[in-house]
Amino acid sequence: QSVLTQAPSMSAAPGQRVTISCSGTNSNVGKNFVSWYQQFPGAAPKLLIYENNKRPSEIPDRFSASKSGTSATLDITGLQTGDEAEYFCGVRDSSLASWVFGGGTQVTVL
Amino acid sequence: QVQLVQSGAEVKKPGDSVRVSCKASGYIFTSVGISWVRQVPGQGLEWVGWIAAYNDKADYGRRFQGRVTMNTDTATSTAYMELRGLTSDDTAVYYCARWLVTDHFDFWGQGTVVTVSP
Protein backbone atom coordinates (compact mmCIF):
# COMPACT_ATOMS: atom_id res chain seq x y z
CA GLN A 1 0.00 0.00 0.00
CA SER A 2 1.68 3.20 -1.21
CA VAL A 3 1.60 6.39 0.84
CA LEU A 4 0.76 8.28 -2.35
CA THR A 5 -2.29 7.22 -4.34
CA GLN A 6 -2.25 6.93 -8.10
CA ALA A 7 -4.70 5.28 -10.45
CA PRO A 8 -3.17 1.95 -11.56
CA SER A 9 -3.88 2.53 -15.24
CA MET A 10 -5.15 5.05 -17.75
CA SER A 11 -5.60 4.96 -21.49
CA ALA A 12 -6.31 7.37 -24.30
CA ALA A 13 -6.02 7.59 -28.05
CA PRO A 14 -3.08 9.21 -29.84
CA GLY A 15 -3.31 12.97 -29.74
CA GLN A 16 -5.53 12.97 -26.70
CA ARG A 17 -4.72 14.18 -23.20
CA VAL A 18 -4.07 12.14 -20.08
CA THR A 19 -4.11 13.55 -16.57
CA ILE A 20 -2.49 11.45 -13.86
CA SER A 21 -3.20 12.35 -10.26
CA CYS A 22 -1.11 11.74 -7.17
CA SER A 23 -2.91 12.11 -3.86
CA GLY A 24 -1.05 12.50 -0.60
CA THR A 25 -1.22 14.26 2.74
CA ASN A 26 -0.09 17.45 4.44
CA SER A 27 3.14 15.75 5.48
CA ASN A 28 4.23 14.93 1.93
CA VAL A 29 2.54 16.43 -1.16
CA GLY A 30 1.08 19.30 0.84
CA LYS A 31 4.44 20.28 2.22
CA ASN A 32 7.29 19.31 -0.13
CA PHE A 33 8.32 19.37 -3.77
CA VAL A 34 6.77 16.68 -5.95
CA SER A 35 8.65 15.06 -8.81
CA TRP A 36 7.47 12.73 -11.56
CA TYR A 37 9.26 9.84 -13.23
CA GLN A 38 8.64 7.89 -16.43
CA GLN A 39 9.64 4.25 -16.67
CA PHE A 40 9.62 1.95 -19.67
CA PRO A 41 9.69 -1.84 -19.18
CA GLY A 42 13.15 -3.07 -18.33
CA ALA A 43 14.58 0.44 -18.04
CA ALA A 44 15.48 2.76 -15.20
CA PRO A 45 13.10 5.56 -14.25
CA LYS A 46 13.65 8.93 -15.91
CA LEU A 47 12.99 12.34 -14.38
CA LEU A 48 10.09 14.14 -16.08
CA ILE A 49 9.15 16.90 -13.63
CA TYR A 50 10.83 18.34 -10.52
CA GLU A 51 9.91 20.98 -7.96
CA ASN A 52 6.19 20.40 -8.69
CA ASN A 53 6.15 21.81 -12.22
CA LYS A 54 9.63 22.23 -13.71
CA ARG A 55 10.81 20.24 -16.71
CA PRO A 56 14.39 19.23 -17.45
CA SER A 57 15.44 20.82 -20.73
CA GLU A 58 15.16 17.60 -22.73
CA ILE A 59 11.56 16.88 -21.70
CA PRO A 60 9.03 18.12 -24.26
CA ASP A 61 6.44 20.67 -23.17
CA ARG A 62 3.69 18.11 -23.83
CA PHE A 63 4.48 17.06 -20.27
CA SER A 64 3.37 19.47 -17.57
CA ALA A 65 2.48 19.22 -13.91
CA SER A 66 0.93 21.14 -11.08
CA LYS A 67 0.16 20.83 -7.40
CA SER A 68 -2.73 22.01 -5.29
CA GLY A 69 -2.98 21.24 -1.61
CA THR A 70 -2.33 17.55 -1.08
CA SER A 71 -2.76 16.53 -4.73
CA ALA A 72 -0.42 16.73 -7.67
CA THR A 73 -1.17 16.09 -11.32
CA LEU A 74 0.85 15.22 -14.40
CA ASP A 75 -0.62 16.15 -17.77
CA ILE A 76 0.42 14.59 -21.03
CA THR A 77 -1.02 16.33 -24.07
CA GLY A 78 -0.78 15.25 -27.69
CA LEU A 79 -0.36 11.65 -26.53
CA GLN A 80 2.06 9.57 -28.62
CA THR A 81 2.64 5.84 -28.78
CA GLY A 82 6.10 6.48 -27.34
CA ASP A 83 4.48 7.81 -24.16
CA GLU A 84 3.23 4.35 -23.28
CA ALA A 85 5.00 3.78 -19.97
CA GLU A 86 4.53 3.77 -16.22
CA TYR A 87 4.50 7.09 -14.40
CA PHE A 88 5.41 7.55 -10.75
CA CYS A 89 5.10 10.54 -8.46
CA GLY A 90 7.53 10.95 -5.60
CA VAL A 91 7.98 13.29 -2.66
CA ARG A 92 9.65 13.55 0.73
CA ASP A 93 7.40 12.69 3.64
CA SER A 94 8.30 14.87 6.60
CA SER A 95 6.39 12.75 9.14
CA LEU A 96 7.93 9.48 8.01
CA ALA A 97 11.36 11.12 7.51
CA SER A 98 11.40 9.19 4.28
CA TRP A 99 10.98 9.53 0.55
CA VAL A 100 7.79 7.98 -0.83
CA PHE A 101 6.56 7.03 -4.28
CA GLY A 102 3.11 6.57 -5.67
CA GLY A 103 2.14 3.10 -6.82
CA GLY A 104 2.55 4.11 -10.45
CA THR A 105 0.12 4.67 -13.32
CA GLN A 106 0.43 2.60 -16.47
CA VAL A 107 -0.48 4.71 -19.48
CA THR A 108 -1.71 2.86 -22.55
CA VAL A 109 -2.07 4.54 -25.91
CA LEU A 110 -5.04 3.00 -27.68
CA GLN B 1 27.53 13.98 -19.31
CA VAL B 2 26.35 12.61 -16.00
CA GLN B 3 26.54 8.83 -15.77
CA LEU B 4 25.92 6.36 -12.98
CA VAL B 5 27.19 2.86 -13.68
CA GLN B 6 26.21 0.09 -11.31
CA SER B 7 27.80 -3.26 -10.57
CA GLY B 8 26.50 -6.46 -12.07
CA ALA B 9 23.76 -8.83 -11.10
CA GLU B 10 24.04 -10.79 -7.87
CA VAL B 11 22.59 -14.10 -6.73
CA LYS B 12 22.53 -14.61 -2.99
CA LYS B 13 21.15 -17.07 -0.47
CA PRO B 14 18.81 -16.16 2.39
CA GLY B 15 20.79 -14.64 5.24
CA ASP B 16 23.57 -13.40 2.97
CA SER B 17 24.64 -9.82 2.44
CA VAL B 18 24.96 -7.98 -0.87
CA ARG B 19 26.99 -4.92 -1.76
CA VAL B 20 26.08 -2.91 -4.84
CA SER B 21 28.29 -0.17 -6.23
CA CYS B 22 27.42 2.92 -8.24
CA LYS B 23 30.26 4.73 -10.02
CA ALA B 24 29.52 8.35 -10.90
CA SER B 25 31.07 10.48 -13.60
CA GLY B 26 30.42 13.74 -15.41
CA TYR B 27 29.92 15.90 -12.33
CA ILE B 28 31.54 16.77 -9.00
CA PHE B 29 30.69 13.73 -6.93
CA THR B 30 30.85 15.49 -3.57
CA SER B 31 28.48 18.28 -4.62
CA VAL B 32 25.29 16.24 -4.25
CA GLY B 33 23.94 12.98 -2.85
CA ILE B 34 23.14 9.49 -4.02
CA SER B 35 19.88 7.74 -3.33
CA TRP B 36 19.08 4.04 -3.61
CA VAL B 37 15.67 2.88 -4.81
CA ARG B 38 14.53 -0.68 -5.38
CA GLN B 39 11.82 -2.24 -7.49
CA VAL B 40 10.44 -5.70 -6.87
CA PRO B 41 9.52 -7.36 -10.18
CA GLY B 42 6.13 -6.14 -11.37
CA GLN B 43 5.79 -3.66 -8.53
CA GLY B 44 6.44 -0.01 -7.82
CA LEU B 45 9.44 1.93 -6.60
CA GLU B 46 10.61 1.79 -2.99
CA TRP B 47 13.08 4.19 -1.45
CA VAL B 48 15.89 2.45 0.42
CA GLY B 49 17.83 5.49 1.58
CA TRP B 50 20.28 8.17 0.60
CA ILE B 51 23.72 9.46 1.39
CA ALA B 52 25.18 12.92 1.06
CA ALA B 53 28.45 12.44 -0.78
CA TYR B 54 29.85 15.67 0.72
CA ASN B 55 29.74 14.47 4.34
CA ASP B 56 28.78 10.77 4.19
CA LYS B 57 25.66 11.39 6.23
CA ALA B 58 23.06 8.77 5.39
CA ASP B 59 19.35 8.33 6.06
CA TYR B 60 17.61 5.03 5.61
CA GLY B 61 14.04 3.98 5.06
CA ARG B 62 12.44 2.56 8.20
CA ARG B 63 12.02 -0.88 6.64
CA PHE B 64 15.76 -1.09 6.09
CA GLN B 65 17.18 0.50 9.22
CA GLY B 66 19.58 -1.84 10.97
CA ARG B 67 20.00 -3.86 7.80
CA VAL B 68 21.46 -1.41 5.32
CA THR B 69 24.63 0.64 5.19
CA MET B 70 25.50 3.24 2.58
CA ASN B 71 28.87 4.84 2.09
CA THR B 72 30.97 6.54 -0.53
CA ASP B 73 34.53 6.51 -1.81
CA THR B 74 35.24 10.05 -2.97
CA ALA B 75 38.59 9.02 -4.48
CA THR B 76 36.77 6.90 -7.06
CA SER B 77 33.41 8.76 -7.06
CA THR B 78 31.65 5.56 -6.10
CA ALA B 79 28.71 5.00 -3.80
CA TYR B 80 27.98 1.68 -2.14
CA MET B 81 24.92 0.08 -0.63
CA GLU B 82 25.18 -3.02 1.55
CA LEU B 83 22.05 -4.91 2.52
CA ARG B 84 22.31 -7.66 5.12
CA GLY B 85 20.09 -10.49 6.26
CA LEU B 86 18.66 -11.02 2.80
CA THR B 87 15.34 -12.77 2.32
CA SER B 88 13.42 -13.64 -0.81
CA ASP B 89 11.49 -10.39 -0.30
CA ASP B 90 14.70 -8.52 -1.14
CA THR B 91 14.73 -9.92 -4.66
CA ALA B 92 14.51 -6.75 -6.74
CA VAL B 93 16.26 -4.37 -9.08
CA TYR B 94 18.27 -1.85 -7.08
CA TYR B 95 18.86 1.57 -8.62
CA CYS B 96 21.15 4.36 -7.58
CA ALA B 97 20.15 7.88 -8.51
CA ARG B 98 21.73 11.28 -8.15
CA TRP B 99 19.85 13.12 -5.46
CA LEU B 100 19.70 16.90 -5.64
CA VAL B 101 19.12 19.27 -2.73
CA THR B 102 15.81 20.33 -4.31
CA ASP B 103 14.63 16.82 -3.54
CA HIS B 104 14.51 14.90 -6.76
CA PHE B 105 16.52 12.27 -8.58
CA ASP B 106 17.75 13.54 -11.91
CA PHE B 107 20.00 10.77 -13.21
CA TRP B 108 19.66 7.06 -12.56
CA GLY B 109 21.95 4.08 -12.83
CA GLN B 110 21.03 1.17 -15.06
CA GLY B 111 19.93 -0.98 -12.12
CA THR B 112 21.39 -4.08 -10.46
CA VAL B 113 19.33 -7.24 -10.24
CA VAL B 114 19.65 -8.93 -6.86
CA THR B 115 18.15 -12.39 -6.63
CA VAL B 116 17.78 -14.13 -3.28
CA SER B 117 17.14 -17.81 -3.62
CA PRO B 118 17.88 -20.89 -1.46
Image (spheres, coloured by chain):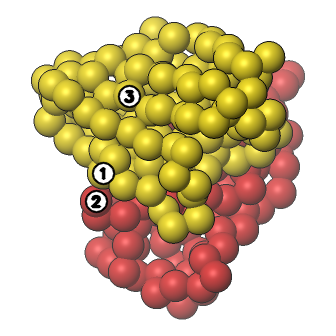
Chain coloured yellow in the rendered structure = A
- Chain of the residue that carries numbered disc 2 in the rendered image: B
Q: Secondary structure at mark 3?
A: strand
Q: Name the residue type under label 1.
A: Glu
Distance from the alpha carbon under mark 3 to that under mark 2: 19 Å
Above-or-below relation of B31 to A51: below
Q: Residue at x 56, y 35 (%)?
A: A77
Q: Residue at x 37, y 64 (%)?
A: B100
Nearer the camera: disc 3 or disc 1: 3
Residue A90's label in the rendered image is none
Q: Secondary structure at mark 1?
A: loop
Q: Residue at x 80, y 17 (%)?
A: A110
Circle 2 packing at 10 Å, graded few (<14), some (14-19), many (20+), is few
Q: Name the residue type under label 2.
A: Thr
Q: Are marks 2 and 1 in contact (CB under 8 Å)?
A: yes
Q: Residue at x 70, y 47 (%)?
A: A44
Report the residue marked by disc 2. Answer: B102
Colour of chain B, in one word, is red
Report the residue marked by disc 3. Answer: A73
Residue A1 percent coordinates (x, y):
46, 9
Residue A51's label in the rendered image is 1
